[in-house]
Image (cartoon, rainbow, N blue to C red):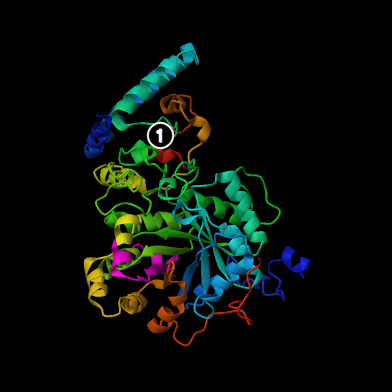
């Protein structure tokens, strides 16, 4: 049952898992993810692969793999320019079960009219976090003949959502009756050129409204350390929660393939060599990931890790446990697991 | 040919910045005069002139929201994603574009060009998305008519 009174007043506490939490003082959203970040916990996020299916239970089943290990779940938006269930729909299904999803918005498929409408819709459906992305080119996906939109870029997108939230209006100036309350995020890739300018670019993203940052895969600690030192010098770690991406590599072969075929992925040779020489390469991949997570947690100014484990989702819990980055903390999970849900046929 | 000229312009961004700063008042002044006498009658040849000149030098796409002096003389509209605050996260390790592997990333070039310019710090300012109604319009004429500020620094 939807409590209309709660929906109209996002600051009121609801009783259903999908109801908004009370918005704490100084918070921009009423979401759990913002509460974890602002409390100073080391956050763990991951991403869910949206199904090629119209089955909502598949979304819940996939999310249940992360129960008790992650603070928020990114719902990708046509990642790699491939069609899947939309990020908005995945988020809506997840909020109904009480999860904290992060809506990913790519500028590739929608113009500013559509994006602003979806932002209101997402907020109305209880989504409290949004990640602003430029998006992969259509040529990378299974519909290379599609028309790319790119009306906005990720920075303009963050500005747009901030305008809606903080000024309570559309870009046109038309007033909103109720502004969307969302924590705004942006992405950064410190590992590809122009490496010397990536911290300056991070500053731009934060100036455009980003309150949290999720990075591309980190397999190269020296580059990350240098990047974070620059970010600290610019005072950026005080202004945004910087979450570093980590990856679970199933094999050296996949790592090599990713390095040459997935845009923006940088994997040093020694990581690949280590996995190649390991007796149990799959296990080694998880060990590498957990070690990198531990090293990341030691860096001053890092607020968390973002575990990307495409087709390795069942191992996310394992690497989080192995790394120990959560300490004694157990992130929220639904009381009843959705792991055994039967598919709708 | 044009691609090589584009890279040349970025390599010599400092020179083109000085040239722009020296010539711009004269161009805008002349256009203000022309505007007074002829109104909009000469818009087409003037726009064609701007498109030709900036096209040859910078591969200008005539977005009508020219940001060249803020982007190291590297036109952001040549980015396949038309990103105005780049680069994206897909840049190849060798600095080439993710989408067009034979083209140097427009935004790697932009930060490089800006590093040589006196006013290069302007690349750190946020540029909002283009107004699509201005596609094909002359930025010079728009400055002359006071539709956009004369100096980039006055725009915000």
Magenta residue span:
A234-256
User: Is residue A236 visible in the rendered structure shown here?
Assistant: yes
- Residue A345 magenta-drawn? no
Residue A226 locus on image (x, y percent): 27, 66
Query: Who is closer to the viewer here, A222 or B149?
Result: A222
The residue labelled by disc 1 is B66
Q: Residues within 10 Å of mark 1 (few under 14, many from 20)?
A: some
Q: B21 above or below A232?
A: above
What residue do we see at 53% from left, 62% from top? A50
Compared with B35, A230 (above or below) is: below
| Left or right, B42 with reference to A298 | right
Question: At x 62% / y 59%, what residue is drawn?
Answer: A122
The chain that hosts pointer 1 is B
Q: Residue, x 42% and y 44% (percent of image)?
A: B81
Image side of residue A286 versus residue A46, left or right:
left
Q: Position of residue B50 (x, y in %)?
A: 37, 23
- Report whether B91 appears left or right of B35: left
Residue A246: x and y, percent?
A: 38, 70
Dot 1 falls on a residue whose secondary structure is: loop
A248 part of magenta stretch: yes
Which quadrant: the C terminus of chain A?
bottom right
Image coordinates for residue B25, horizontal then vertical, percent: 35, 26
The quadrant in which the N terminus of chain A is found is bottom right
């Amino acid at each position: 049952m939807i409590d209309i009174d709660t929906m109209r007043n996002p600051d009121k506490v609801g009783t259903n898992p999908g109801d908004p939490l009370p918005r704490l003082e100084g918070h921009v959203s009423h979401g759990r993810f913002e509460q974890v970040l602002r409390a100073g916990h080391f956050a763990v996020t991951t991403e869910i692969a949206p199904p090629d299916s119209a089955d909502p239970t598949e979304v819940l089943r996939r999310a249940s793999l992360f129960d008790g290990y992650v603070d928020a779940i990114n719902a990708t938006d046509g990642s790699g320019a491939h069609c899947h269930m939309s990020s908005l729909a995945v988020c809506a299904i997840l909020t109904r079960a009480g999860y904290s999803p992060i809506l990913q918005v790519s500028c590739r498929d929608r113009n500013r009219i559509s994006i602003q409408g979806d932002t209101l819709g997402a907020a109305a459906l209880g989504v409290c976090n949004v990640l602003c992305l430029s998006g992969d080119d259509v040529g990378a996906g299974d519909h290379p003949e599609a028309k790319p939109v790119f009306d906005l870029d990720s920075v303009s997108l963050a500005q747009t959502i901030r305008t809606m939230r903080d000024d309570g209006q559309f870009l046109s100036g038309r007033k909103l009756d109720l502004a969307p309350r969302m924590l705004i995020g942006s992405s950064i890739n410190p590992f590809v050129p122009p490496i010397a300018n990536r911290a300056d670019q991070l500053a731009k993203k934060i100036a455009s409204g980003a309150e949290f940052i999720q990075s591309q895969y980190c397999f190269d600690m020296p580059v990350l350390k240098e990047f974070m030192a620059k970010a600290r010098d610019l005072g950026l770690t005080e202004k945004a929660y910087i979450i570093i991406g980590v990856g679970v590599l199933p094999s050296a072969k996949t790592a090599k393939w990713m390095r040459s075929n997935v845009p923006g992925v940088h994997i040093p040779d020694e990581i690949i060599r280590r996995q190649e020489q390991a007796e149990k390469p799959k296990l080694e991949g998880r060990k590498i990931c957990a070690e990198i997570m531990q090293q990341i947690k030691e860096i001053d100014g890092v607020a968390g890790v973002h575990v990307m484990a495409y087709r390795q989702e069942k191992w996310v819990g394992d690497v989080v446990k192995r790394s120990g980055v959560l300490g004694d903390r157990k992130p929220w999970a639904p009381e009843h697991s959705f792991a055994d849900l039967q598919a709708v046929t | 040919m044009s691609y090589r000229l584009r890279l040349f312009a970025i390599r010599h961004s400092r020179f083109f910045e000085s040239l722009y700063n020296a010539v711009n008042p004269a161009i805008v002044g002349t256009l203000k005069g022309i505007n007074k006498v002829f109104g909009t009658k000469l818009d087409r040849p003037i726009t064609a002139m701007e498109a030709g000149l900036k096209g040859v030098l910078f591969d200008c796409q005539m977005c009508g929201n020219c940001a060249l002096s803020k982007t190291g003389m590297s036109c952001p509209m040549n980015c396949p994603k038309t990103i105005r605050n780049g680069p994206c996260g897909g840049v190849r390790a060798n600095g080439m574009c993710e989408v067009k592997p034979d083209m140097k990333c427009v935004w790697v070039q932009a930060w490089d060009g800006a590093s040589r310019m006196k006013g290069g710090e302007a690349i750190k300012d946020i540029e909002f998305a283009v107004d699509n109604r201005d596609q094909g319009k002359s930025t010079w004429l728009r400055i002359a008519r006071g539709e956009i500020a004369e100096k980039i620094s006055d725009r915000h």
